[in-house]
Image: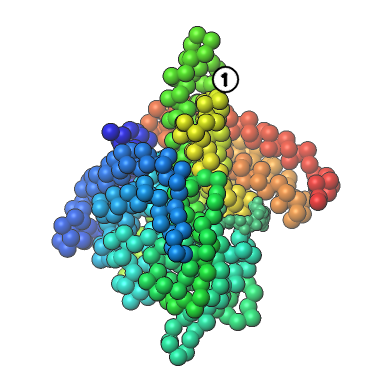
């Protein structure tokens, strides 16, 4: 009997972060639902107890059902039958278990049948599910689409669609097309309003759509004839019951095989518009993508945790040259680095989730009453940091989960290359995380402004203000020194006043910011609980070495030198 929540002490640590009290009290708005719903919490402690219980159920389903199913799902995958998707047997069993336990629509308000959970425990559930089966985590995680309907659709649409999510309706996010991948402004699937029927009709093709045959799909489409950019795009809800969209194929891919990736053909498919015309990409998809990037963050942390567990177990059991391989410095070095990186990205994940919680809760309150000046200020503060942290989280967590899966396979030696051990699947599953929901390169494009306008530096300075235990002071000194190197190298690159040169070194600059931020987060975790001291120590020293390397690379390639690279 495995429980992926109870066996992971780090989850409880992050769930009990000091900011959770404010998050819960704001979210529950003085616990006003307690007289309306028998499952609504009475106070903060009761709410935390609820999250704990639900996470325990998810931990149990993940450990006892999803993880044992993962290998079979990976082997058989979904099938295409008469242009519709049939999930693998294990995927359907996972889904049934989740639906039976009423765990869809967790973050939706109670008036729509949800549990009104903050983002933090929801993201935690996604991490737990991802550790068991990263492919299934996509089907689970696409309930994010309900949030977009909740935030931006009309009251009538909310009443119509949101309760269906709680009953187990699955979702899809239909953005990508053959000629519109990273550049979603190029989307061409057409939506036109049919005056006779009084309905919008969709025509065109979507590619690489996860869970493309879902019950409820959000579809990005061009509504403005003759337009070429983002201002011509709107967002729609397509209901599978309309039966006007066909799955043309399911992609045969490297990993996350349980998650069907579909090519879709829409033919006069009736759909309902969300919010206002022309705001599809600019506002609604941007918000959806930010949630989805947080989702990939949780998926990456779950994969990293799974890979670490497999490596630790194997390294203890496997003996060579007369001793367990975990006793060799080359092996324990890899394992400790894996642990420190996993702790680091997890800390970044929940920090970002708390920022998102804080500003999104205020946004919902603002729909019901006017916020005070202080509340508005606080909302803007957290929104700014949520936007700044999200691309760094996506970049680091996805790249690290790949590195951790790679090292875990290495620790398994030849055995890791065989299908007999789950690391072979985990290694393949990890590879998608730094590609979808915006590649790592696109996360750098999103983050580099925060380097140039010194927003990351400002946050780092705020972190610096937090007092730490005397035994952690040496780590703070290292971080302060690294911060001054960061400011120096940033000024040097920007002083060249050369856009192409900034883009050329952008990844290295964003990485330096990320190393320092994660270093501070781990040090603050150690400040709350000294069991994190080891990870903080290892990560910050590793960060110092990486930052030195990045700075040396930048200093080696001046604006004149980059022409040598041009293709
Ligand atoms: C398994 C899977 C599931 C998916 N699920 C979904 C889904 O559910 N819904 C959906 O809408 N889409 C989905 N996608 C699509 C996914 O989001 C895109 O594949 C991804 O955004 C990249 O687009 P692309 O494949 O067209 O690559 P391209 O945009 O062609 O990029 C190719 C390369 O060029 C680089 N590049 C492009 N532009 C820039 C730039 N400005 N600066 C620097 N480098 C750049 C990229 O980083 C990449 O290395 C999925 C894809 C896969 C593989």
Q: Nearer the viewer, residue 229 or 93?
A: 93
**Which x, y percent locates residue 215?**
38, 65
Q: Residue at x 49, y 38 (%)?
A: 426
Res 65 seen here: yes
Q: Residue at x 40, y 27 (%)?
A: 531
Residue 500 located left or right of residue 195: right
Q: Residue at x 68, y 34 (%)?
A: 549
Q: Nearer the viewer, residue 72 or 550?
A: 72
Point out the residue furthest to the top here: 322
From what the image shows, is residue 250 above or below residue 314?
Answer: below
Q: Residue at x 34, y 48 (%)?
A: 94
Is ligand 1 closer than 8 angstroms to the Cβ of mark 1? no
In the rendered image, the quadrant that contains the N terminus is top left
**Which x, y percent locates residue 467?**
44, 36
From what the image shows, is residue 323 above or below residue 333?
Answer: above
Res 409 seen here: no
Q: Nearer the viewer, residue 534 or 567?
A: 567
| Residue for badge 1 | 330
Point out the residue furthest to the bottom here: 196
Q: Nearer the viewer, residue 67 or 443?
A: 67
**Which x, y percent locates residue 304?**
48, 37
Dot 1, how many residues are within 10 Å of its Cα: few (below 14), some (14-19), or many (20+)? few
Tag 1 secondary structure: helix
User: Colour scheme used in the picture?
Assistant: rainbow
Point out the residue furthest to the front here: 82
Q: Quadrant of ligand 1?
A: bottom right
**Which x, y percent locates residue 293?**
49, 53
Task: Give the total of numbered labels.
Answer: 1
Residue 371 located left or right of residue 294: left
């Amino acid at each position: 009997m495995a429980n992926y929540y109870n066996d992971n002490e780090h989850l409880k640590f992050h769930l009990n972060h000091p900011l959770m009290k404010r998050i819960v009290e704001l979210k529950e708005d003085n616990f006003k639902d307690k007289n309306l719903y028998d499952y609504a919490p009475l106070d903060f402690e009761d709410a935390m107890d609820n999250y704990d219980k639900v996470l325990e159920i998810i931990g149990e389903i993940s450990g006892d059902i999803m993880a044992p199913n993962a290998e079979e799902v990976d082997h058989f995958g979904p099938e295409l039958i008469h242009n519709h998707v049939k999930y693998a047997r294990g995927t359907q069993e996972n889904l049934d278990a989740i639906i039976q336990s009423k765990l869809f629509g967790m973050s939706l308000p109670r008036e729509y049948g949800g549990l009104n959970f903050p983002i933090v425990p929801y993201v935690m559930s996604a991490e737990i599910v991802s550790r068991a089966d990263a492919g299934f985590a996509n089907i689970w995680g696409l309930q994010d689409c309900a949030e977009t309907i909740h935030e931006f659709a009309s009251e009538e649409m909310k009443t119509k669609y949101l309760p269906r999510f709680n009953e187990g309706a699955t979702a899809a996010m239909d953005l990508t097309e053959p000629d519109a991948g990273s550049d979603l402004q190029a989307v061409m699937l057409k939506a036109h309003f049919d005056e006779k029927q009084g309905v919008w009709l969709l025509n065109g093709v979507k590619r690489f759509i996860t869970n493309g045959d879902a019950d409820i799909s959000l579809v990005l489409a061009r509504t403005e004839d003759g337009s070429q950019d983002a201002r011509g795009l709107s967002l729609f809800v397509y209901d599978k019951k309309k039966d006007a969209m066909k799955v043309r194929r399911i992609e045969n891919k490297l990993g996350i095989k349980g998650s069907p990736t579909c090519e879709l053909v829409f033919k006069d498919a009736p759909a309902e518009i969300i919010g206002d015309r022309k705001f599809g990409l600019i506002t609604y998809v941007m918000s959806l993508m930010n949630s989805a990037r947080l989702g990939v963050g949780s998926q990456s942390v779950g994969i990293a945790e799974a890979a670490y567990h497999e490596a630790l177990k194997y390294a203890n059991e496997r003996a060579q040259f007369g001793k367990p391989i975990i006793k060799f410095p080359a092996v324990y070095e890899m394992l400790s680095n894996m642990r420190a990186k996993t702790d680091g990205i997890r800390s970044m994940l929940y920090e970002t989730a708390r920022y998102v919680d804080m500003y999104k809760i205020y946004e919902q309150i603002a729909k019901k009453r006017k916020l005070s000046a202080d509340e508005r200020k606080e909302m803007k503060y957290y929104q700014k940091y949520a936007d700044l942290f999200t691309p760094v989280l996506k970049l680091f967590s996805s790249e690290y989960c790949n590195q951790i899966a790679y090292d875990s396979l290495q620790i398994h030696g030849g055995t890791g290359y065989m299908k007999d051990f789950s690391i072979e699947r985990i290694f393949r599953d990890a590879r998608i995380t730094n590609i979808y929901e915006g590649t790592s390169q696109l996360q750098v494009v999103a983050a580099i402004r925060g380097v140039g306008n010194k927003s990351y530096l400002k946050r780092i300075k705020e972190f610096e203000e937090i007092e730490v235990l005397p035994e952690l002071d040496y780590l703070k000194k290292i971080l302060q020194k690294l911060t001054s190197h960061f400011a120096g190298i940033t000024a040097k690159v920007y002083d060249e006043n050369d856009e192409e040169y900034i883009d050329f070194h952008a990844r290295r600059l964003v990485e330096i910011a990320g190393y320092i931020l994660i270093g501070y987060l781990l040090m603050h975790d150690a400040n709350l609980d000294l069991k994190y001291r080891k990870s903080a120590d290892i990560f910050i020293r590793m960060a110092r070495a990486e930052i030195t390397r990045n700075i040396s690379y930048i200093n080696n390639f001046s604006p004149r030198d980059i022409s040598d690279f041009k293709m």
